[in-house]
């Protein structure tokens, strides 16, 4: 058996160390991940679907709007601009409710304050008895398509009802 050549082994290890240090140095000089609005500037998000004022559709609509606004934080200069953009998504009864306020001689304060505007939408369009509606929906809920769709609807109702596990299990099966 030939004696190990220590100098070659040391030289090989030194080359590996230099290579690893170069890779580490290159990695440290890369730009860090930027999750800011400026980093997402080129990202185009889909606008929310229109809201017609139909009962039970306000919360999902507001969730879509919230996502759009978070992905486009510099899109609007102020609350008034945001509300005007929002009004372009209103159809049917919802538009019929909004438009007279926009044309009013003395417009309401919520036309210039986005949180007040959303609160006004809740007052006008929320389900007045969402618990009773959820109880009725869970009683008539049945699986007509995939288990995943059934489970999604069931979980949505579960979040509203906040019943104990035994009661929910009874309705699930």
Image (cartoon, rainbow, N blue to C red):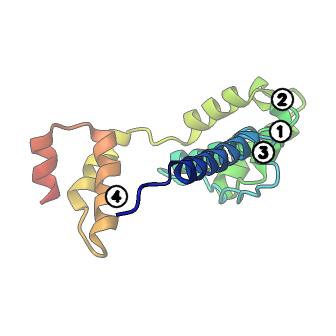
State how many labels appear.
4
Q: Kindly identify which residue carries mark 3.
A: 39
Give the Cα separation between the discs numbered 4 and 1.
33 Å
Q: Residues within 10 Å of mark 4 (few under 14, many from 20)?
A: few
Q: Position of residue 132 (x, y in %)?
A: 30, 43
Which circle marks residue 74 in the picture?
1
Q: Secondary structure at mark 1?
A: loop
Q: Kindly identify which residue carries mark 2.
A: 107
Which comes sooner in the sequence, label 3 or label 4? 3
Give the Cα separation between the discs numbered 2 and 3.
37 Å
The image quadrant where one finds the N terminus is bottom left
Q: Residues within 10 Å of mark 1 (few under 14, many from 20)?
A: few
Q: Residue at x 28, y 45 (%)?
A: 158
From the image, state whether disc 2 or disc 1 is nearer to you. Answer: 1
Closest to the observer: 26 or 18?
18
Which comes sooner in the sequence, label 1 or label 3? 3
Q: Kindly identify which residue carries mark 4.
A: 152
Give the Cα separation between the discs numbered 2 and 1.
26 Å
Q: Residues within 10 Å of mark 3 (few under 14, many from 20)?
A: few
């Amino acid at each position: 058996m030939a004696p190990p050549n220590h100098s070659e082994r040391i030289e090989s290890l030194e080359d590996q160390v230099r290579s690893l240090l170069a890779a580490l140095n290159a990695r440290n000089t890369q730009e860090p991940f930027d999750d800011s609005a400026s980093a997402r500037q080129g990202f185009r998000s889909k606008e929310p679907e229109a809201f017609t004022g139909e009962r039970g559709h306000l919360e999902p609509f507001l969730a879509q709007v919230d996502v759009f606004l978070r992905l486009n934080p510099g899109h609007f200069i102020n609350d008034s601009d945001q509300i005007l953009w929002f009004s372009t998504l209103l159809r049917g009864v919802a538009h019929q409710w909004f438009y007279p306020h926009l044309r009013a001689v003395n417009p309401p304060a919520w036309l210039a304050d986005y949180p007040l505007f959303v609160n006004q939408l809740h007052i006008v369009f929320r389900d007045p008895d969402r618990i009773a509606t959820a109880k009725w929906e869970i009683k008539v809920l049945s699986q007509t398509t995939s288990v995943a769709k059934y489970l999604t609807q069931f979980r949505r109702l579960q979040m509203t009802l906040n019943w104990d596990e035994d009661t929910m299990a009874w309705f699930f099966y």
